[in-house]
Amino acid sequence: MLKRIIILICVVLLAGCAPKTVKEASEQITEQFRNVTVCTMDAEISADFGDRVSVFTVRYTQTAAETGTITILTPSEIAGITAQFAEGSSAVTFDDVTLETGKLAGTALTPIDAIPTMMRTWADGLLSETTLETLEGAKCYRLTYEIPDSNILQNAWFAVDTLVPVFAETLVDGQRVISCKFSAVSLT
């Protein structure tokens, strides 16, 4: 009997933690990304350069707040190249050679810095719209962020049950320029 009571209490407590509205979910997602210090996530990144579309698979690893590494997994021609991120700067390395890339000008976004930029937006961005949608058969919260003083929007879909990112896209003048399909996400 005591075991059943403990299980019932756990279920009630867990149910109290789950977001009841899209607004509550968006607040939990914001807090989650404000407080994340360690994470690992794989993503398939598609970048539309206008004259061509490039697809990369990457692993993002963050071991401290605002510090992380992206390792390119595919295509095989550039697999193993890494990019180091720290507050305000980034560096690309391969075979012990480092190329300093410095700060990006204005609101520019490159495929290599897409994930850390998205994570900063999820933590501190200007949220303009929240909805509940189905994405590839799974219920997700879609959050839309406006990038101030620019023509850039970001949409991000988070799994209803875990609040981890499933898919995100960056739009410039309404055109998708970068998309990320996430897998193997671990946040702490």
Image (tube, rainbow, N blue to C red):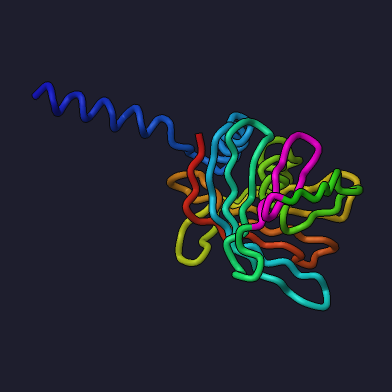
Residue drawn at x 66%, y 65% is 78
Residue drawn at x 64%, y 40% is 68
Residue drawn at x 69%, y 49% is 96
Residue found farthest to the top? 2
Compared with 188, 141 (above or below) is below
- Image coordinates for residue 57, horizontal then vertical, percent: 59, 63
Compared with 1, 151 (above or below) is below
- Image coordinates for residue 67, horizontal then vertical, percent: 67, 36
Q: Which quadrant would residue 55 be assigned to in this image?
A: bottom right
Task: Tell me, yes or no, whether the highlighted magenta stretch contains residue 93.
Answer: yes
Residue found farthest to the left? 1
Is residue 110 rendered to the left or right of residue 184? right
Quadrant of the rendering where the N terminus is positioned: top left
Residue drawn at x 69%, y 55% is 94
* Range drawn in magenta: 81-96
Q: Main secondary structure of the magenta part?
A: strand
Number of numbered discs visible in the structure rendering: 0
**Res. 23 visible in picture:** no
**Res. 9 visible in picture:** yes
- Image coordinates for residue 71, horizontal then vertical, percent: 61, 53
Is residue 78 rendered to the left or right of residue 132? right
Task: Tell me, yes or no, whether the highlighted magenta stretch contains residue 170.
Answer: no
Residue found farthest to the bottom? 51
- Image coordinates for residue 6, horizontal then vertical, percent: 20, 24
Pick whichever, 73 or 51, lies toward us.
73
Pick whichever, 94 or 131, lies toward us.
94
